[in-house]
């Protein structure tokens, strides 16, 4: 029977040959559950198969958490019925903490008529199968009862590696027993130890292993006593967890963990799907003692994901990220020196044939034309310049796309010298020969070499001065070089820095004149690191992180950001995105709930990646709790309302911080209190009478508020008239007894709205404040007496009244004290060794019943008191076994519920026990008449009997002298009938009818007669035919 309604597929019965495998499948729809359900498999009804999980039995769960699979490789031993419907439970189900009941023991000791009732109470579905086994067990027990007075239990369980001792009792202490395991005789070894102590026979198994999981039998002759031993494997714990890893594409990956036991079986999963050895040998599994390693050869982007290792005692999860390899330069470009009309060829080779790039000349992108050709074949990139001209001279740079580095080389133009007649020409700076104008800007990447090669003319050769602002630039430090050659002035900065940015002026002079030009140099760099990220919110497996842009973008606009995260206790940072993310708010997913993480951010511009930001504050991915449940109105008045609710069903990994309560007025939700409350009830005050408000409650934890739970309908703030009612506790519905001096503190609950008027009275008069204290509240009243006295006894009336409606209750209070001493104790007679005493009850019984008396005696010589009777109920007694020749005095204490009376009552006279030889004259008494007419104290009872079975009729009679008894059937004397036998013992009269037939039915009468009178009693006897047994 499906008790939960969650099963979409139930296990099916099946048959299997010995040695073959069989699989049972159950599917559960867990979409409606807040938490993954717990599933257990049972064999029969009571054997938990989780304890036998191993090579023989395997329990598996699929990724969608809707199937549970049991694989059994031994059909003979595992025959039986599997049932786990009663163990599938939701989170709200409370697990019973009562001890497990032995149903076999209950059935074996119960009558057969109770079997169905017991099966219903304990949820037994296979009652017929259990009864067959029970019948067989009873037969075996009856057969071997004489040989095994104390048998072994049907089954035992022991943890692997521990020892167990099997004990059985035999009837003969000298008999030899034989122990069998699965029908094979056991030989005594270091692991198997046989012991014989009196009638007990013991088998001790040391260091139990899975091979000891078997049926054991103790044999005496042909008699057997059998039990089963189940060896439970201890849970395999994960000692060393998996670590997150980030590798380059094509590298080998090893995910390693360590478990608590060597040779244990583990299960590897990737994103919830179990990993197995495939034909491509993509995954390899390695065992080395307690270490287990998952090896992935030549990792690809498809191998990214969450990897999990599972044992029957725990699990560990890590994330694997695969990143593209960094670009490697196999051949860099080289400096060239070419003549006019020659060809210049720049060539480089990189590791990735898919990478494209851009060529620059003096910071300006080179465009292909009729003379310039750019090619990309495989890993080789070429720049070809045909018919080189003087203006082609400069620094050439190749920048791979998406990588923060470049390759640079210089092209030198070799001029052919021609002698000519010197003449004077004014100097001239030819910026147009470089493809630039005075307004153009030269861009250089920080760290690269800045080379300004400016063509100049003039005769004689002009002098060149470089300035930045008003400062003349010279070869002051090792980074700056100024060089002047014929036709060129060269300004070089090795490893350009941010402070090298600005406007550089070059001035050329000769006797014929001068010329000036300005060159704007812009140094671009990777941006500064962003500000430390902030965690805005967290979810069950995600978080929302936000950061501020870097203060300096490096001279190039920021195109995006790269984020990394790591576990707080780990040292490996995992990259979350490989393409730049354009916004400053990012939702990171696929994290493990309850694990502490940190985040950091890189900024990316056209130059490359910045340094990382400082790490964020540690945070834990936590899901908000489920909504509170059971929100209802507890109380309401004209200006306030009291709400109550129950905690959420699912709290999660984070601690519950409290509850927020809000009410809706004019479509606006207003907090009812400042902050949160940690209680599950709240009274909201200062509300307006007549307002119609809606209320809701949300639970808060580290992740924020939960989904709100709202009242079913709005509530009008107005007090509701409630009839007064007193809730009198059960113990106050009977007389309350207190001892003098005790405290009386009675708390009595009541209800009623508006607040009722409470009145206490005693014996019809209002209570005085000096007599007893009364404290009243809205829901209860307290009657308090600090020190009780006898005068506080009586009947107290409580009245609760609202206008013309009222309710009353009464309480009886009895204040008790120690009793006074008994009165008039006197000696009434002395004879032999006996003394007769008599007294009267005490005047003051302590306001409760006298429960008895304590009588004591003392010899006048020693005056040492000895107790004669305790808790004696009568007011007269006889003190016996007194010593001859001694003189005695007596005293009596009264006893009640509180205790012994403080003072005793003593005899005024003493009693002297006469010595032997004194003749005792017994008193004469009038003889008492004990005659009594016969009377039946127990009548005859009508009977219905079966013909052929002897029966008896019984009654009892009393009378003095002993009455004469006569039996009648249908008013005819049957005293002399041979069929009947009459018996009389101690007043019990019995008529035995031997093997009655149908004619023996009728009216039977018994008559008792003596001198004082007579009495009769009769009954009807019905004789039925023999019952016919009908087989089932």
Image: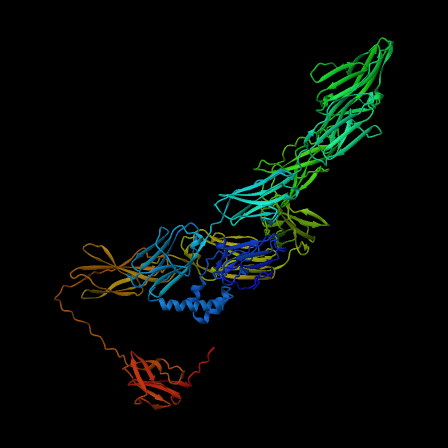
Q: Is residue 338 left or right of residue 164?
A: right
Q: Nearer the viewer, residue 586 or 856?
A: 586
Residue 565, horizontal then vertical, whole percent: 63, 38
Give the residue at x 46% y 79%.
1031
Question: Does 859 appear above or below 654?
Answer: below
Quarter of the figure with the N terminus: bottom right
Give the residue at x 78% y 14%.
485
* Residue projecting furthest to the front: 342
Q: Is residue 595 visible?
A: yes
Residue 255, horizontal then vertical, whole percent: 57, 41
* Residue projecting furthest to the left: 917
Q: Is residue 312 left or right of residue 793?
A: right
Counting every numbered tag in the picture gives 0
Question: Does 8 appear above or below 980?
Answer: above
Residue 494, horizontal then vertical, whole percent: 71, 20
* Residue projecting furthest to the bottom: 972
What is the quadrant of residue 718 in the picture?
Answer: bottom right
Q: Is residue 823 left or right of residue 861?
A: right
Q: Nearer the viewer, residue 730 or 387?
A: 387
Q: Nearer the viewer, residue 992 or 142?
A: 142
Q: Is residue 765 visible?
A: no
What is the quadrant of residue 320 in the picture?
Answer: top right
- How is the rendered protein coloured? rainbow
Residue 530, horizontal then vertical, whole percent: 68, 32
Question: Does 945 appear above or below 67?
Answer: below
């Amino acid at each position: 029977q499906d008790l939960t309604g969650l099963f979409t597929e139930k296990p099916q019965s099946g048959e299997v040959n010995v040695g073959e495998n069989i699989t049972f499948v159950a599917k559960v729809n867990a979409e409606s559950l807040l938490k993954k359900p717990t599933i257990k498999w049972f064999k029969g009804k009571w054997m938990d198969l989780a304890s036998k999980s191993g090579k023989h039995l395997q329990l598996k769960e699929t990724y969608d958490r809707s199937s549970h699979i049991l694989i059994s490789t031994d059909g003979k031993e595992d025959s039986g019925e599997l049932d786990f419907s009663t163990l599938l439970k939701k989170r709200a189900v409370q697990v019973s903490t009562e001890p497990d009941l032995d149903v076999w023991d209950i059935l074996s000791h119960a009558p057969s008529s109770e079997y169905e009732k017991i099966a219903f109470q304990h949820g037994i579905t296979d009652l017929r199968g259990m009864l067959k086994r029970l019948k067989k067990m009873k037969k075996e027990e009856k057969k071997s009862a004489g040989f095994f007075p104390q048998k072994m239990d049907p089954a035992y369980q022991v943890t692997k590696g521990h020892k167990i001792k099997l004990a059985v009792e035999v009837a003969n202490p000298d008999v030899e027993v034989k122990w069998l395991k699965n029908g094979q005789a056991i030989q005594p070894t270091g692991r198997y130890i046989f012991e014989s102590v009196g009638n007990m026979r013991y088998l001790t198994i040391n260091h139990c292993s899975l091979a000891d999981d078997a049926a054991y039998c103790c044999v005496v002759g042909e008699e057997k006593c059998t039990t089963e031993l189940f060896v439970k494997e201890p849970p395999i714990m994960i000692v060393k967890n998996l670590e997150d890893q980030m590798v380059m594409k094509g590298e080998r990956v090893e995910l390693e963990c360590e478990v608590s036991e060597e040779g244990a079986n583990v299960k590897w999963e990737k994103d919830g799907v179990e990993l197995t050895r495939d034909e491509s040998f993509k995954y390899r599994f390695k065992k080395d003692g307690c270490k287990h390693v998952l090896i992935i050869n030549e990792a690809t982007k498809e191998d990214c994901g969450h990897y999990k290792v599972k044992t029957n005692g725990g699990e560990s999860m890590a994330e694997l990220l695969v990143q593209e390899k960094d670009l490697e330069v196999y051949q860099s470009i080289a400096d060239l020196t070419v003549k006019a009309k020659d060809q210049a060829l720049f060539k480089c080779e990189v590791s990735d044939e898919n990478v494209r790039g851009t060529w620059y000349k003096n910071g300006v992108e080179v465009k292909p034309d009729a003379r310039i050709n750019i090619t990309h074949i495989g890993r080789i990139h070429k720049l070809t310049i045909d018919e080189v001209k003087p203006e082609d001279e400069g620094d050439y740079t190749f920048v791979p796309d998406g990588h923060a580095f470049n390759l640079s080389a210089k092209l030198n133009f070799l001029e052919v010298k021609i002698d000519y007649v010197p003449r004077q020409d004014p100097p001239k700076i030819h910026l147009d020969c470089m493809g630039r104008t005075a307004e153009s800007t030269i861009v250089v990447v920080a760290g690269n070499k800045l080379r300004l090669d400016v063509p100049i003319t003039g005769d004689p050769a002009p002098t060149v001065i470089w300035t930045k602002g008003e400062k003349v630039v010279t070869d002051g430090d090792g980074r700056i070089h100024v060089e002047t050659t014929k036709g060129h002035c060269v300004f070089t900065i090795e490893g350009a820095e941010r402070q090298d940015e600005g406007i550089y002026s070059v001035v050329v002079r000769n006797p014929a004149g001068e010329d000036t030009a300005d060159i704007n140099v812009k140094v671009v760099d990777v941006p500064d690191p962003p500000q430390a990220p902030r965690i805005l919110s967290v979810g069950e497996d995600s978080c929302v992180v936000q950061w501020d842009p870097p203060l300096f973008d490096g001279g190039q606009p920021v195109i995006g950001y790269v984020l990394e995260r790591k576990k707080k206790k780990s040292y490996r940072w995992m990259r979350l995105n490989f393409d730049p993310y354009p916004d400053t708010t990012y939702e990171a997913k696929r994290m493990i709930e309850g694990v502490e993480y940190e985040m950091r951010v890189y900024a990316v511009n056209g130059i490359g990646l910045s340094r990382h930001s400082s790490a964020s504050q540690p945070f834990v991915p936590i899901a908000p709790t489920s909504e509170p449940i059971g929100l209802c109105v507890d109380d309401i008045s004209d200006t306030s309302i009291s709400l109550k609710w129950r905690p959420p069903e699912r709290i999660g990994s984070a601690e519950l911080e409290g509850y927020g309560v809000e009410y809706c007025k004019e479509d606006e939700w207003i907090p009812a209190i400042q902050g949160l409350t940690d209680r599950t009830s709240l009274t909201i005050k200062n509300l307006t009478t007549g307002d119609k408000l809606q209320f809701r409650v949300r639970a808060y934890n580290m992740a924020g508020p939960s989904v709100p739970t709202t009242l079913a309908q709005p509530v009008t703030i107005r007090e509701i008239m409630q009839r007064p009612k007193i809730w009198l506790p059960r113990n106050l519905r009977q007389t309350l007894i207190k001892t003098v001096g005790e405290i009386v503190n009675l708390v009595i609950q009541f209800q009623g709205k508006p607040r009722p008027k409470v009145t206490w009275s005693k014996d019809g008069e209002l209570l005085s404040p000096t007599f007893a204290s009364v404290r009243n509240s809205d829901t209860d009243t307290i009657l308090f007496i600090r020190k009780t006295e006898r005068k506080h006894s009586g009947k107290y009336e409580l009245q609760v009244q609202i206008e013309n409606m009222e309710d009353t209750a009464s309480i009886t209070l009895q204040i008790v004290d120690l009793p006074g001493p008994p009165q008039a104790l006197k000696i009434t007679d002395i004879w032999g060794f006996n003394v007769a005493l008599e007294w009267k009850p005490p005047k003051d019984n302590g306001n409760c019943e006298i429960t008895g008396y304590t009588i004591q005696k003392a010899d006048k010589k020693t005056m040492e008191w000895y107790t004669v009777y305790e808790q004696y109920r009568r007011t007269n007694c006889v003190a016996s076994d007194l010593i001859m020749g001694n003189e005695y005095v007596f005293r009596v204490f009264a006893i009640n519920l509180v205790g012994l009376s403080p003072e005793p009552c003593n005899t005024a006279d003493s009693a002297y026990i006469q010595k032997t030889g004194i003749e005792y004259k017994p008193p004469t008494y009038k003889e008492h008449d004990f005659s009594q007419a016969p009377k039946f104290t127990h009548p005859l009872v009508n009977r219905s009997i079966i013909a052929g079975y002897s029966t008896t009729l019984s009654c009892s009679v009393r009378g003095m002298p002993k009455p004469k008894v006569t039996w009648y059937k249908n008013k005819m004397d049957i005293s002399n009938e041979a069929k009947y036998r009459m018996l009389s013992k101690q007043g019990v009269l019995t008529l035995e009818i031997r093997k009655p037939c149908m004619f023996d039915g009728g009216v039977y009468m018994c008559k008792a007669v003596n001198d004082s009178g007579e009495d009769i009693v009769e009954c009807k006897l019905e004789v039925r035919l023999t019952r016919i047994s009908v087989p089932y």
